[in-house]
Amino acid sequence: MQIKDIILYGKNNKKRVLSFELGKVNIITGESKTGKSSLIDIVDYCLGSEDCKIAFGKIRDNVLWFGLRLQFPSEQIFIARQNPDVLGQKTTSNLHFEVGDQIDIPDVISLTPASTLHALKSFLSNKLQIAPNIFEPPSGQTRPPLETTFRHALFFCFQEQNVIASKKVLFHQQDEKFIPQTIKDILPYILGAVREDQLKLEQELQRKQRELRKAERELAEALKIKEDGISKAYALVEEAKEFHLLPAACSPQDVPQAIQYLHSITQWESTLEEVTPDDEQLRELQEKRKVFELQLQEKKAEIRATEAFAKEAEGYTTESHQQELRLESLNLFFQDQHAAEMCPVCMQRMEYTTSTAQHIQKSLQKLRDHLETTTREKPKLRTYINQLKDEATIATREVERLNNAIQAIYQEREAAKNLKELNIRKGRVIGRVSLFLESVVIVDDFSGLNQRLNRLRQEVRELEELAEQGRGDEKLHSILNMLNVQMSKWSERLNLEYKDSAIRFDIKELTILVDSEQGEPIPLQKLGSGENWVSYHLLIHFALHKHFINANRPVPRFLFLDQPSQVYYPPEKDAEYQGDISKSSDEQAVHNMYRLIFDTVKYLSPNLQVIITDHANLKIEDFQESIVEEWRRGKKLVPGDWYE
């Protein structure tokens, strides 16, 4: 995959097309602040970056869409992504892409946001033939497994201005959170140190390991059952005897006989006895008891009322009798036919009767009659009370009888409950017996399990060896050695401080090490000048891309370099804005650097495209022939008539 065109679609409906040669060095030279450094951000944005890192200013103020036309061996892909500022957003997933043998760059009116970032990334990963892969972190580490995608391959395709001259980072986005670890994790796959079918191999290994663990458990369980079989069989026989499932005299002589006894009780449930008390009878007895309890309450109430009445009558009789005795002491009570002529007070005969005397006589006679009535009624009350007490006694006895009958039913139910609990306990015993009989191994032949176990162990060993080889520690070490040899060889062409020393790429720290004569490895950040830092960045990236091409690895075949000559040629010293280098030593160093770039690209042609944006404008033939555009004297990425 190489870049054929970068396209800007302006708000004025104009197109700005920046075209490149495939398989060659392409140089854009120009003044500062002309948009050179934004090209990497535009390409990265079109290739699915989550963030829009294109600088604010003339570009984002005047562009509607950013476009990219890519060239694959047999087809082209056009990608356009909308400027998020147009939508008032920080970023957007709105994009348009087309695939075809030959694609004409469409007009802005044809662009429709008909696809997503996820679809684009999946499509480009498939186009680059990135095989399904999973990096599993070492045991004990908490980060999730990682699958290498197209976006990861871009770590090795961009060298921004602040990266190419850095002493701390080598790769695109390496200074961002979590990215260094991601680069370390995906490098073995990107380099080809991991088998393409490693994921399938790892999954097959995990499946076989699960089968092996299952077979080991089955054999262990079978051996345990056999080991415990004798004691377990005898224990179950004794338990069955305790619950009368087997006769007390039952005494097996060996395990087969014990198992035979246990088989004999597994049908016990068919003879299960149940006691079910009659609920209807209980309800009838309870209803009758309620009737007699009500009668008893009524009789007791009548007895209390009658006795209270009798007590009141007794009091009246006693008081009346006392009054009678007092009157008799006065000789007021007398029986005489001439009583009406006698004075009731002085007991003297009256010449004529008075009304007062008559009234007194009538009252005395009425009192005498009441006393006689009360005396006659007392025996009747006592008889009635005794009758009520007899009826209450009968009701009490009936309630007691019914209570006894109800209690008997409850006792019967308790017996049923106990029997049910006993049956449940018997059922539990039989359940344990059934489980034992289903799992017991009488014979000693475990050959089938052992054969299966041995076969699985052999398969797991073979898969582990393949997986270990596929993980590529030895192969990775070999690839790194080749990279180191290539970098050391190329370093002789550059004016490096340690050009005669061995150079090594440290994959664990993602840096360059130089083996000094003192035997102490010197890391990149301690190598000194910016010239060294730029040169080592170029060495590792060209060495990597040479390996990617030779090993047919799924990495885009372009390398984008921004301002590689900046450490030799500060733009502020260019008074004429022509990109000339005044010091001869710096000029020679820049020439050596560019000569390495040109020679390497020619050697790898047509498989590597290098795009360079630089302030320098070297007066050498290859450099001049490689210039695709020069942005000086008012010419810029965004044409002036778009915003003037």
Image (spheres, grey):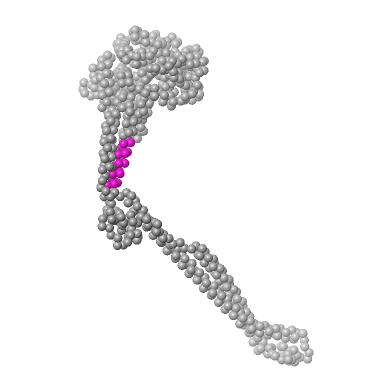
User: What x and y, as percent, mark residue 371?
Assistant: 66, 84
User: Which sits in the foreground, 310 or 22?
Assistant: 22
Q: In the rendered image, is residue 530 in sight?
A: no
Who's the residue at 37% across and 15% down the image?
A: 611
* Image side of residue 635 versus residue 187, left or right: right
In which quadrant will I find the N terminus? Answer: top left
Residue 214 is inside the magenta segment:
yes
User: What x and y, as percent, mark residue 453?
Assistant: 27, 40
User: What x and y, as percent, mark residue 535?
Assistant: 30, 17
User: Which sits in the foreground, 71 or 91?
Assistant: 71
User: What x and y, as percent, mark residue 531?
Assistant: 31, 16
Quadrant hosting residue 302: bottom right
**Does residue 574 sit above or below 540 in this rendering?**
above
Who's the residue at 47% across and 24% down the image?
A: 115
Q: Which residues are magenta?
A: 206-223
Residue 342 is inside the magenta segment:
no
Quadrant hosting residue 295: bottom right
Who's the residue at 47% across and 13% down the image?
A: 639
